[in-house]
Image (cartoon, rainbow, N blue to C red):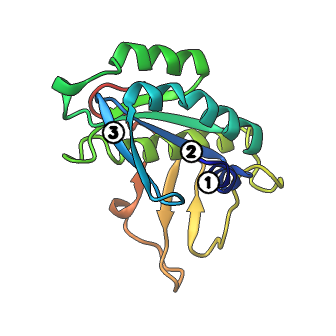
Amino acid sequence: MNVETRSVTRSYYRGAAGVILVYDITKSVLVGDFATSSNRFFSSRETFINLSKWLADARTLASPHLVAVLVGNKSDREEDREVEWSEASRWAAENGVHFLEASSLTGDNVEAPFLLAARSILLSIESGVLDPEKAGSGVSYGDRALRRVTSSSHLSFGSLSGSRRKRSDRIRLRNWMPSGKCC
């Protein structure tokens, strides 16, 4: 990745409460560099090895209590696997990040990293580790008429008129666990 692209990408981390790092589990990836109009193949080993740089950038620039989720993409292509699940799982444990694999092609576990990050951030708020009122925490309450987080880890979206929605419309995160290999 060129210096300009990395500089812009790093700006996205500033003050973030969560980051999702994705690598390719398969043998090779064709990557186009839009700045130079050139293409080259990266091995997925390269994308996996570069995770350390991305995580270091995120931890340097984001909230001190950053929630990180590592996602191995293309789990539907087991026959083309280069990065083993056990290796990525060990890396995640050593670096203090959540881990799972997903397939953007089949949709398997695609929502899981977002829900896992949201759940972890909500639990950090409830435990007092993250304070949405504090600048640099990476989270804020926003418009309380539109969004409300209750003490039992429910994320609910109310209508603009302020009327309460049925309980079945809430997303319950407390006991959520992703399907497949995780964490």
The residue labelled by disc 3 is 29
The residue labelled by disc 1 is 5
Which of 32 and 163 lies nearest the eye of the viewer? Answer: 32
> Residue 112 falls in which quadrant of the image?
top left
Which of 27 and 150 lies nearest the eye of the viewer? Answer: 27
Image height of 66 relative to 147, above or below:
above
Q: In which quarter of the image is the N terminus?
A: top right
Q: Where is residue 106 in the image (x, y as percent from the top left)?
A: 19, 46
Judging from the image, what secondary structure is the residue with disc 3 in?
strand
Judging from the image, what secondary structure is the residue with disc 2 in?
loop
Name the disc covering residue 102, or none: none
What is the three-letter code of the residue carrying label 3? Val
Q: How crowded is mark 3: few (under 14 residues within 10 Å), some or many (20 or more)?
A: some
Q: Among all residues in the image, which is located at the extreme right?
A: 135
> Sequence-wise, which precedes: disc 3 or disc 1?
1
Q: Where is residue 78 in the image (x, y as percent from the top left)?
A: 19, 26
